[in-house]
Image: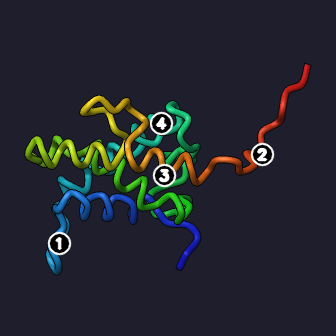
Amino acid sequence: MASLRTANDLILEALANLGVLAAGQPIDPEDYSYVEEKIDAVFRKVDALEIVSLPDPTQVGLNVAFIPSAYFSDLADILAGECATKFGETPDVYQMLIMRGLGGVQGIDVGFGAAAKSLRAIVRGKPTGEVVRVE
C-alpha cells in the first residue's frame, strides 16, 4: 500500500462515499469537477479548524501524491459530507454524511464529526516540525 495518495484518488473516494460511482460506469465530468473545486476549500477549512495541516492542492496538483494514507479515508468522508447537498441526498443521508465528516448537525459542533475526531487522534502527539517559541 502506498504511503501517499493523490487528490484525484480522494475525489474518486468521495464520489464513491456519496454513492455516485457505479461499477463499470464512467465518472460524470460534472460531478468530478464539482468535488475537485471543493477540495481547496475543504483543506483550508480542515486547517483552519486545526484538525490537520495539508499542502495546498492548487500548488501541488491533483495527480501528485501528497495525502498521507492514514488521513485518506477520513478526508474522503469529510469531502463527501461537504459535497452532499449538490448530489440531492435525503435529509437523513445528508446528516449521516455530515456526522461521518466534520460534524455540524444534531448539536455536534463543526470539527467534531467522526472523521475530524479520527484525524485529531492520528496527529495527536506527533512532532510538527514547527519552531517552538520561548520567552
Residue that label 1 marks:
26
Mark 2 or mark 3: whose residue is earlier in sequence: 3
Q: Residues within 10 Å of mark 1 (few under 14, many from 20)?
A: few
Of badges 4 and 2, nearer the viewer stands 2
Mark 1 or mark 3: whose residue is earlier in sequence: 1
- Which residue appears at 91% of the width and 19% of the height? 135
Q: In the picture provided, is 130 more to the left or to the right than 8?
A: right
As drawn, the label of residue 118 is: 3
> How far is mark 2 from mark 3, CA to CA?
21 Å
> How far is mark 1 from mark 2, CA to CA?
42 Å
- Which residue appears at 42% of the width and 55% of the height? 74
Residue that label 2 marks:
129
Q: Secondary structure at mark 3?
A: helix
As drawn, the label of residue 11 is: none
Q: Secondary structure at mark 4?
A: helix
Amino acid under disc 3: Ser
Looking at the image, is 37 positioned above or below residue 133? below
Q: Secondary structure at mark 2?
A: loop
Q: Closer to the camera, 64 or 89?
A: 89
Amino acid under disc 1: Pro
As drawn, the label of residue 44 is: 4
Of badges 1 and 3, nearer the viewer stands 3
